[in-house]
Image (tube, grey):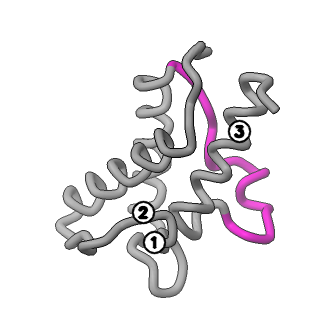
Amino acid sequence: MTSLPITRTDLSHLVIESLRDILDQSGRPAPDRIDESTLLFGKGALLDSLALVTMVVDLEQRLEETFGITLTLADDRAMSQRNSPFRSIGALVDYLMQLIDEETGRD
């Protein structure tokens, strides 16, 4: 568990960095502008299902390496939500903040 405060900005940068790496590895061009409104998965989004799975695993590793926190991002809870936490960068960052707050006991 980490004693560092993890900010929304930290997580947003981490997700964007991961996305850029996944796009680069797959040979897909990254858009000029990537921000919290960028669609990750679904109609008109940047990632297909395989790339999304790769990104989820990458993010879990980055969270542990960077912040010392171990989270499972793709579980029944994530998959059963009405609005997918993987739809956009902003939705994913919201979900990460929620999981980290629960894991660390922050309110």
Query: Along the polypeptide, which appears first: circle 1 or circle 3?
Result: 1
Residue 71 part of the magenta-drawn span: yes
Query: Along the polypeptide, which appears first: circle 3 or circle 2?
Result: 2
- Identity of the residue drawn at 52% across and 86% down: 43
* Distance in Å between CA atoms under marks 1 and 3: 21 Å
Above-or-below relation of 65 to 78? above
Q: Position of residue 74 (x, y in %)?
A: 63, 49
Above-or-below relation of 37 to 19? below
Q: Position of residue 63 (x, y in %)?
A: 48, 32
Q: Main secondary structure of the magenta part?
A: loop
Q: Secondary structure at mark 2?
A: helix
* Distance in Å between CA atoms under marks 3 and 2: 23 Å
Q: Which residue, given by chain and number where applicable, does mark 3 sit on?
A: 99
Query: Along the polypeptide, which appears first: circle 2 or circle 1?
Result: 1
Q: Position of residue 5 (x, y in %)?
A: 58, 24
Residue 46 part of the magenta-drawn span: no
How many labels were placed on the picture?
Answer: 3
Q: Residues at badges 3 and 2 in contact (C-beta under 8 Å)? A: no
Q: Which residue, given by chain and number where applicable, does mark 2 sit on?
A: 50
Q: Secondary structure at mark 3?
A: helix
- Identity of the residue drawn at 72% across and 54% down: 78
Q: Which residues are magenta?
A: 68-84
Q: Position of residue 87 (x, y in %)?
A: 58, 69
* Distance in Å between CA atoms under marks 2 and 1: 18 Å
Task: Tell which of 69 and 47 is nearer to you.
Answer: 69
Mark number displayed over residue 90? none
Give amino acid for label 1: Thr
